[in-house]
Image (cartoon, grey):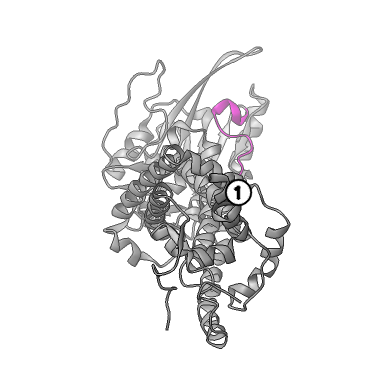
Amino acid sequence: MARSLTNLYDVSKCTACRGCLVACKDSNQLPAVIEPFKGNYATHEDTNGNTYTLIRFIEHEDPVDGVRWNFLKWQCMHCFDAECMKVCPKNAYTKTEWGATIHDEDKCIGCQYCTYACPFGIPKYRKRTDTVTKCTLCYERVEEGLKPACVRTCPSGALTFGYRDELLQQAEERVKMLRANGFPRATIYGKLELGGTNKIYVLTDTPDKFGLPVEPKVSANTWVWQDWVQPYAGWLIPIALAASATSFVTNRILDSKKKNHAEGGHE
Amino acid sequence: MKWIPEYRDDVPRVERFNLIARITHWGHTVTFLLCLFTGLILFLDGVDWLAFIFGGYRGAGLVHRIAAVGMTIMLLFGLIAGFKGLIAWMKDIGRFGKNDIMFLSIFPLDFFGVPMKFPPQTRFNGGEKMNSLVLLTMVTLLVLSGYIMWFPAIFPAGLVRFSYPVHDLAMIFSTLMVCMHGFLGSFHLGSGESFWGMWKGTVRADWAQHHHAIWYEETYGDKAKSEEE
């Protein structure tokens, strides 16, 4: 596998201008989705069929620090071990050489298995095309040597794009700096979570303060379903059919020897 | 070659299933098979041709849901209209005992056509009791998990995720049972007469006496007759 190319998102540099959201819509030709006002600055509650990325606004009260207001750019994490890929019955998901999880809309039948398997609940159904959609890590742009649209537009330098190993080093240095400068709980997210994601966050606080699952896990249900039920349990049905077919034949062979079993079955 | 035992009205016959039971049974047959063949499109790889029969994936999904609602209606119909019969059925399943275990242990030989001498059985023999129990449970699970997956927004995410393997497993076990049940209830020479019990409602009296001795004695035997009088 080639070196992974990825996105580093540094919360401490983000001003929540939402330029990334607009650039994403522009680049992917997605229409605006207007959601009702919910009493905070968030434009959208969650990703939807026409919104691949958004900025989340999370307020929380800390007994020591008082009220904290956190932003988080929210989109597909491009997990290396992607659940959406595993559960998709039509194999619409693929992984590029450099680590983007991409979704082929031509193969998608809109069953939404991925929506509920995803530990982050990212893929969403879009009625207009009767398919699921999600962030593509702008693989078409990246393969032409360009940066993803969100990175290109980011005015504050919160988003950077490059090789994952280099960005991880950069992130670690940044976390060290933050910890020494008033953010003792600063951390990296996406380095180890779910076996590594092709999207790295530098957070100024623990992941739960950003509405992120602290220890995202693959649901045991998904595991049982995909690794056990799907490949093996189904064989019980052909076995039953084969047994019936055999019985159909042996019944008639044995019956021809013994005349009246079928006739009311009298011995 | 003989497909199923022929229907004979020149011999004495006794009622085995009333009209409500038969409507419920065949209603479930149609809806179950529709759901099965539309559902297999997602479960198996390389059965796209199945989708085209139903007018593509969208059409198959629609047929699956319509049939599922039909199945729910049949379930409720059986539960409400056939309540007395359902209780009697449950009671008979509850009579699982030594005779049923003996039945089950020698049944595999009979299944392949070796004539066996079975201990007397109640209305439903050991195998039928198992079939009843598994299908009742699995169809209920299928319906419940199906609605959870159909309307995921109103259920907790964990329950929705849990429903996927449950739906698949319930499908597998019920289809397994349906395959065996469908075969035994028609093409199997020894038990094929029971097809007429579900199709026309009656079975040959001598067959009932031979295959379900306890039930026959209790319902149509001399003792039952004398009690009626």
Chain of residue at mark 1? B
When the figure is inspected, residue A205 is found, relative to residue B205, above or below; the finding is above
Q: Amino acid at mark 1?
A: Asp
Which image quadrant for residue B124? bottom right
Badge 1: residue crowd in 10 Å (few <14, some 14–19, many ≥20): some
Which image quadrant for residue B45? bottom left
Residue A77 visible within the image = no
For the magenta stretch, what is the residue range?
Answer: A206-218
Name the spot of residue B148 as percent of width and height, x first: 47, 39
Magenta stretch: includes residue A209? yes
Name the spot of residue A58 as percent of width and height, x first: 50, 22
Magenta stretch: includes residue A70? no
Q: How many marks?
A: 1
Q: Residue at x 73, y 57 (%)?
A: B98
Name the spot of residue B224 as percent of width and height, x first: 57, 50
Which image quadrant for residue B41? bottom left
Q: Nearer the viewer, residue A72 or B162?
A: B162
